[in-house]
Image (cartoon, coloured by chain):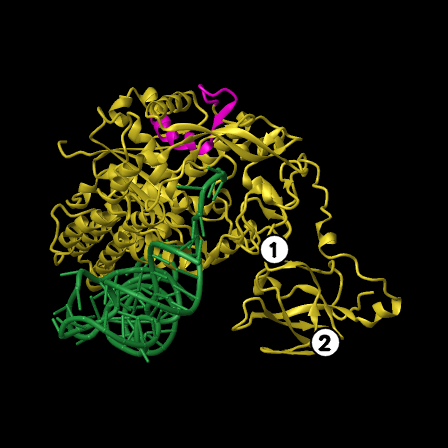
Chain colours: A yellow, B green
Amino acid sequence: MPNMRKILVTSALPYANGHIHIGHLVEYIQTDIWVRFQKLRGNRCVYMCADDTHGTAIMLRAKQEGISEEELIAKMQRAHVADFAAFHVEFDNYGSTHSPENRALCEEIWAAIRKAGMVHEQEVEQLYDTVHGMFLADRQVRGTCPRCRAADQPGDNCSACGAHYSPSELLDPVSVASGTRPEVRTHPHLFIDVDKQHAFLDEWTQTGGHLQPEIANYLKAYFLNEPLKDWDVSRPAPYFGFEIPDSPGNYWYVWFDAPIGYIASTWEWCKRTGEDFDGWWDERKGGETEIHHFIGKDITYFHTLFWPAMLKVSRFSLPRKIRIHGFLTVDGAKMSKSKGTFVLASTYLKHLDPSYLRYYYAAKLSDRVDDIDLNLDEFAARVNSDMVGNIVNLASRTARFAGKTGLAAEYPEDGGLFEQAARDGAAIAEAYEACDYAQAVRLILAAGDRANKYIEDRAPWNLKKEGRIEELREVCTVGLNLFRQLAVYLAPVLPELARRAGELLGEPIEHWRQSEEPLLGAAIGKFAHMMKRVERSKVERMIADSAEPVEEAPAAPGPPPPADSDEPLRREPLAEECAFDDFQKVDLRVARVLTAEPVVGADKLLKLTLGLGGEVTRTVFAGIKQAYEPEQLVGQLVVCAANLKARKMKFGLSEGMVVASGPGGKDVFLLRPDPGARPGQRVH
RNA sequence: GGGCCCGUAGCUCAACGGUUAGAGCAGCAGACUCAUAAUCUGUUGGUUGCAGGUUCGAAUCCUGCCGGGCCUACCA
């Protein structure tokens, strides 16, 4: 095979801190399709992945669950591997960054970076949790924003006013780990002088087609137009990771060793299979190997700047392409636990066939960085009409006739349909190669349409009635061969469909070439459904199953609940004493939200219709838009000030207020009556 | 604030600067009955976000605006 390419493919390493969800699966399905395509084409292609296991988050979670880090990551790896396998994502090796191979490679690459004179030491100020005896990452500290004084903000920027700051600037910082106030400490960190590779990165990112054009532009405009900042790659003990050999007490930051896991996983695979490791990764011996990394846009700069710089100074090969995809939204919005759209892989599998999702993602994915949306109505509609109604239907409506006749010995006249679809194979292959799966699917479906029309025109059911068996056999031979072509083309997306098609036709689908020559003379097996229709009710059950109705309670063996801060009281001191009669003047009532809608022209207001029971309603404009989605409020009980004098606003008359706490913006918390309360009841 | 990307039919998306902007789904009307309420035919539907500019010619190139998503290095 002189033209056989040697290709090594990776997906980003999933973090061992959480389970695989349908957002992750965009990437693994995208990559798996590409790998299966390459294998089907006869190229030598291997797919490497691993769990990303290091870092503070893993330490904290292990502590929370009362197990060792090693136990935690072993458990997670088992779960990840099972989820991927269930979605037909097939790795050649699935390793772990917590492996001896990875440690050895980290040491080797580190030595090369040292040798290139790219490491220096510098003091870093960080918050330190005295209870756990550890430094905290920015996100593990929360506190009051120094600018707008919003409470409970993360350590790097404020979600209320958008201010950026360092954790030590928070007014009353609290460690997420222990709930105590951390102190500021300094510690020497090791930095990689990435800018020493600036000229190389200018060239590598902008030429050679390694990156999508929008990514190259982004890097050029944002990072490469000025000196690259040094990269802090060490963390002081305790840290779950690898200790830096020439800097005792310091550990490599998780993002240093994570991408090296790609190489380590390959090494594991080589040891297991007897493959020549250097032939895959060493740039001197593996020069013919194409390396392709599939990643999400959120980790672009690690893979397009740091990673090439690391590889450049070591003996390892640079990637041929980094293929970057967007995020997944569900029904047009970010995945949400409360809406039930944060669907775990394992939850999906309880309700739906993984092939549905593989097909749907394929139909939506292009070579661009755009986000893709999982629209649940469209999901069901497309699977049913494209796969069941169009493709599988071809087999379904001919296989039963063909069970009796078998396939003809010579391929009949079909008006050029088989030949056209065979010719389309080139364009379909090109689309797969370019990761434009949506285009490939479009071409495949068009061929399916033509085939269905052919069957319609030749009406095999009439041929059978009239006893014209020869003609019937011919029509079935055409229909099933057209179906088989499409099964070959779809095999990267739907390996299970391809397997069943191979079973029906008595010849497994193993190579793209099978789309070029018709299958003749074969007996046809007993037809069984290859894909069931999607039932909308099952989709709904999956969403219901994913919904978390209440805020997730912290795990039982976790740290003690954080002490409540005195910040709210300091921020807004208690009001002057008032008499009972004064209190009585405010008539607070339980009300049900009947309608809720955004107000055109107002970015903070929702217009609510509140029902006080019977026919009594109040229209209220409430400044809660940034904190609540209208649809999550409808039907809910709230408390309203019902006798407040109506106030004319720009958008209409507001006839009361809903009762809520919080500083404003996204931090607004409605008071809600416990179940049992009824609209109209007065609050005493 | 700065940057990247996106905006085309009700929905999801096509359309090397070049005929009258297309397809699937949904809708409507019909046909068919082999097939998983599948299929086939016909059909409705557009000021290509808005306003300028370049050009013989713009959905496509340029500028500005509007709207949406994302990123903004020690966050995984």
Q: Nearer the viewer, mark 2 or mark 1?
A: 1
Q: How far apart are the alpha carbons under marks 2 and 1?
A: 43 Å
User: Residue under circle 2?
Assistant: A614
Query: Residue A42 in the image: x percent, y percent?
Result: 21, 36
Of the numbered discs in the image, which one, if any, rests on residue A148?
A: 1
Query: Residue A577 in the image: x percent, y percent?
Result: 85, 62
Residue drawn at (64%, 36%) of the image: A182
Disc 1: host chain: A
Residue drawn at (35%, 59%) of the image: A385
Q: Nearer the viewer, residue A144 or A412?
A: A144
A260 within the magenta span:
yes
Q: Which residues are magenta?
A: A243-266
Q: Is residue A75 left or right of residue A263?
A: right
Q: Nearer the viewer, residue A226 or A618?
A: A226
Which comes sooner in the sequence, label 2 or label 1?
1
Residue drawn at (30%, 55%) of the image: A393
Disc 2: host chain: A
A132 within the magenta span:
no
